């Protein structure tokens, strides 16, 4: 029996999945996708699949991959989905299919406890406060019992904890084979398990980080893999661009200064004035940040000349020069004493790389790249390619075709483009010749969902727009007892809307306003999913950025999604500007070929938070009059699922009232 026939039989009503997996329900679209993947695995090549929400794409690619008997690499965009695949979906399917398959989970080194760094932290007398000390003690106790060292397994550890960088290694500070704890290293253990496994689950960040530096074991792993699957592939280009470029952060320099002082005093006390070298580097890094001055956090400053825009050229050049001189002095000192201890040798390598990178950023940008400065509490100096097309063609697909093997490459996501060829995804990823498959969602959106554009709201450019969005949410959300997700396009709008809503509901016993950044994302989502269960207050969650996608709240906990503005790319973003100039040079329309497709994909992602199951019902509100009044609004609406249109706020309130009824079969 061919793999395609075996896959069809497995997904068929009464088939193996129906008998072995309680929650499985046969879906035509899921079987179509799985069969196409089976065909690609059989014959090799590249397949791009846009699988609408509710298709069950995870089973669609895992079942044929497992049944094929080939070695498989699965890459996801987030560590959350990575953990779900490895901890839930793969064991479930392997058991159901009765296959003797070995699986492995491989993350970046920053996800694993570093035993050597933990020992260094234990002897560090400069821990900032008691909370940090308590967290460190908790990690030390856990270190005695963990097998994997994966910090995601440690209950109650905030992913934002300042302790995590202290007890994990980075490419900068890892000692490699010279480390005294090399044999018991959790990172190396994970890599060994990956090399011995039949199915390896990684993430896009690790894939491209390794592609850039070839240091995480993927160079050994990838050539032996026959099938490579990228889930959440819509993030592939953005992730690849981030890692294939050249970067330097002031945070890296501050970490280096800290390690320089600790290791210098520990291994070579009195031989060099380590205190002076460390403080020179630290102050130079901080001075570079001060030169930039007060800039709104998250701002990207274009950098087309000798300095980023809005930054004094002379002061910037002087600060870079001072930092280069401080790093050079540290490099010379470490060169002299690097043989004393592996820690000092690694520090020498780190600072040599910093000196090289500082020299790069002191010169002009490559002609086929774009350079910018990310500004936050720290600075990130970036020089990046515009897309990953060249890398995918020359370093992935073509080389693996040339070695004579029939490798299969599968790229899938719920949102990959608005046209038949999915050019939004395939062009920047160099996949123009790939086979394309679009599988529609099984959800009945015309019955389950409605969309409303409040025409009485001011234009998005109006300074009062965010306040009016908050006032609208304050009127609508109480009708359904919260159950509302507000997605903003900027952090500035996030703050304005959330502060207004928190003031409005400050004395309410029935509604609680949750805000991105005020708690860890995991805790926010747990509280939001609980809603008003157990007599608790209903929830309004105000969020931006990462909450536009990957947020899964099935059931009644989420029934109203409010988007403040159409999510067009910010025109002053350096990458956006560079893309625009390239399209102009090609004689193409920047708005039609770039801005509109980008907005359509982001809008579709945000709207995708609303309906997650066949029984879900809800309303999408887009608080941007351009969606209804501008000609291009029809194109953006066409990118959304076919939802019923609501024409007034009174009608909206009626629809929301329907959602409060116990029945889940009434159309809205």
Image (cartoon, grey):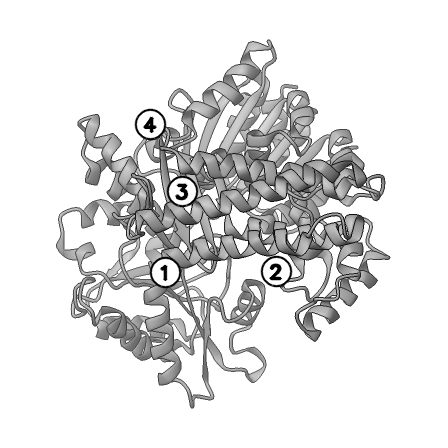
Asked if residue 335 lies left or right of residue 584, the reply is right
- Residue on which the image places disc 2: 159
Q: CA distance from mark 2 to mark 3?
A: 28 Å
Q: Work out whether mark 2 precedes mark 3 in sequence or the reverse, and give the earlier one.
A: 2
Q: Mark 2 falls on what kind of element?
A: loop
Q: Residue at x 62, y 29 (%)?
A: 214
Residue 556 horizontal/vertical position (percent):
48, 68
Q: Is residue 183 above or below residue 78?
A: above
Residue 171 horizontal/vertical position (percent):
64, 40
Q: Residues within 10 Å of mark 4 (few under 14, many from 20)?
A: few
Q: Is residue 118 above or below residue 518?
A: above
Q: Residues within 10 Å of mark 3 (few under 14, many from 20)?
A: many
Residue 424 horizontal/vertical position (percent):
34, 35
Asked if residue 41 lies left or right of residue 233, the reply is right
Q: How many marks?
A: 4
Q: Nearer the viewer, residue 72 or 1?
A: 72
Q: Work out whether mark 4 precedes mark 1 in sequence or the reverse, and give the earlier one.
A: 1
Q: Residues within 10 Å of mark 1 (few under 14, many from 20)?
A: few
Q: Mark 3 falls on what kind of element?
A: loop
On the question of residue 16 being in view, the answer is: no
Asked if residue 210 lies left or right of residue 588, the reply is right
Q: Nearer the viewer, residue 566 or 604?
A: 566
Q: Nearer the viewer, residue 383 or 665?
A: 383
- Residue on which the image places disc 3: 415
Q: CA distance from mark 3 to mark 4?
A: 32 Å
- Residue on which the image places disc 4: 367
Q: CA distance from mark 1 to mark 2?
A: 29 Å
Q: Work out whether mark 4 precedes mark 2 in sequence or the reverse, and give the earlier one.
A: 2
Q: Quadrant of residue 585?
A: top left
- Residue 293 got which mark? 1
Residue 45 horizontal/vertical position (percent):
51, 19
């Amino acid at each position: 029996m061919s793999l395609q026939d075996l896959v069809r039989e497995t997904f068929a009503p009464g088939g193996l999945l129906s008998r072995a997996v309680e929650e499985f329900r046969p879906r035509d679209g899921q079987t179509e996708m799985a069969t196409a993947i089976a065909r690609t695995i059989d014959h090799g090549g590249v397949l791009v699949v846009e699988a609408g929400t509710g298709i069950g794409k995870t089973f669609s690619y895992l079942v044929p991959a497992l049944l094929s008997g080939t070695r498989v690499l699965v890459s996801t965009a987030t560590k959350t989905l990575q953990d779900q695949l490895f901890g839930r979906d793969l064991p479930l399917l392997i058991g159901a299919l009765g296959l003797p398959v070995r699986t492995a989970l491989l993350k970046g080194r920053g996800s694993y406890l570093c035993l050597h760094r933990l020992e260094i932290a234990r002897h560090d007398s400069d821990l900032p406060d008691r909370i940090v000390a308590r967290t460190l003690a908790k990690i030390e106790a856990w270190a005695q019992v963990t097998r994997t060292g994966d910090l995601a397994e440690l209950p109650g550890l905030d992913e934002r904890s300042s302790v995590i960088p202290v007890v994990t290694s980075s490419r900068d500070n890892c000692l490699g084979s010279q480390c005294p704890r090399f044999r018991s290293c959790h990172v190396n253990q994970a890599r060994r398990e990956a090399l011995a496994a039949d199915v390896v689950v990684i993430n896009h960040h690790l894939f491209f980080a390794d592609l850039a530096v070839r240091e995480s074991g993927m160079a050994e792993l990838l050539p032996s893999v026959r099938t490579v699957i990228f889930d959440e592939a819509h993030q592939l280009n953005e992730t690849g661009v981030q890692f294939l470029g050249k970067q330097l952060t002031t945070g890296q320099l501050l970490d280096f200064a800290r390690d320089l002082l600790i290791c210098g005093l520990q291994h070579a006390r009195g031989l060099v004035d380590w205190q002076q070298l460390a403080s020179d580097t630290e102050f130079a890094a901080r001075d570079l940040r001060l030169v930039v001055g007060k800039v709104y956090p998250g701002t990207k400053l274009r950098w087309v000349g000798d300095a980023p825009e809005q930054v004094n050229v002379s002061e910037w050049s002087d600060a870079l020069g001072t930092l280069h001189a401080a790093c050079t002095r540290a490099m010379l000192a470490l060169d002299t004493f690097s043989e004393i201890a592996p820690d000092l040798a690694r520090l020498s390598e780190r600072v040599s790389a910093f000196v090289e990178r500082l020299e790069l950023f002191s010169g002009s940008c490559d002609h086929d790249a774009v350079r910018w400065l990310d500004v936050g509490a720290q600075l990130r100096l970036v020089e990046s390619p515009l897309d990953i097309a060249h890398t995918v063609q020359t370093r992935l697909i073509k080389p693996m075709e040339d070695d004579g093997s029939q490798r299969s490459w599968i790229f899938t996501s719920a949102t990959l483009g608005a046209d038949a060829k999915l050019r939004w995804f395939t062009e920047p990823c160099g996949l123009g010749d790939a086979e394309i498959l679009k599988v529609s969602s099984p959800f009945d959106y015309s019955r389950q969902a409605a969309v409303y554009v409040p025409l009485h709201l001011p234009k998005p450019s109006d300074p009062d727009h965010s306040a009016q969005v908050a006032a609208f949410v304050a009127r609508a959300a109480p009708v359904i007892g919260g159950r509302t997700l507000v997605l903003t396009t900027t952090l500035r709008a996030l703050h304005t809307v959330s502060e207004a809503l928190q003031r409005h509901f400050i004395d309410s016993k029935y509604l609680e306003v949750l805000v991105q950044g005020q708690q860890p994302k995991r805790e926010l989502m747990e509280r939001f999913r609980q809603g008003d269960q157990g007599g608790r207050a209903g929830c309004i969650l105000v969020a931006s950025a990462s909450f536009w996608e990957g947020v899964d709240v099935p059931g009644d906990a989420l029934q109203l999604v409010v988007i403040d503005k159409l999510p067009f790319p910010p025109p002053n973003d350096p990458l956006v500007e560079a893309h625009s100039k390239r399209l102009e040079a090609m004689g193409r329309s920047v708005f039609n070929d770039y801005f509109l497709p980008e907005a359509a994909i982001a809008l579709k992602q945000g709207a995708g938070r609303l309906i997650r199951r066949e029984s879900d019902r809800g309303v999408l509100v887009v608080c941007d009059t351009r969606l209804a009044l501008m000609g291009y609004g029809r194109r953006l609406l066409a990118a959304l699922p076919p939802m019923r249109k609501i024409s007034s706020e009174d009608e909206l309130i009626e629809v929301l009232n329907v959602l409060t009824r116990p029945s889940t079969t009434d159309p809205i």
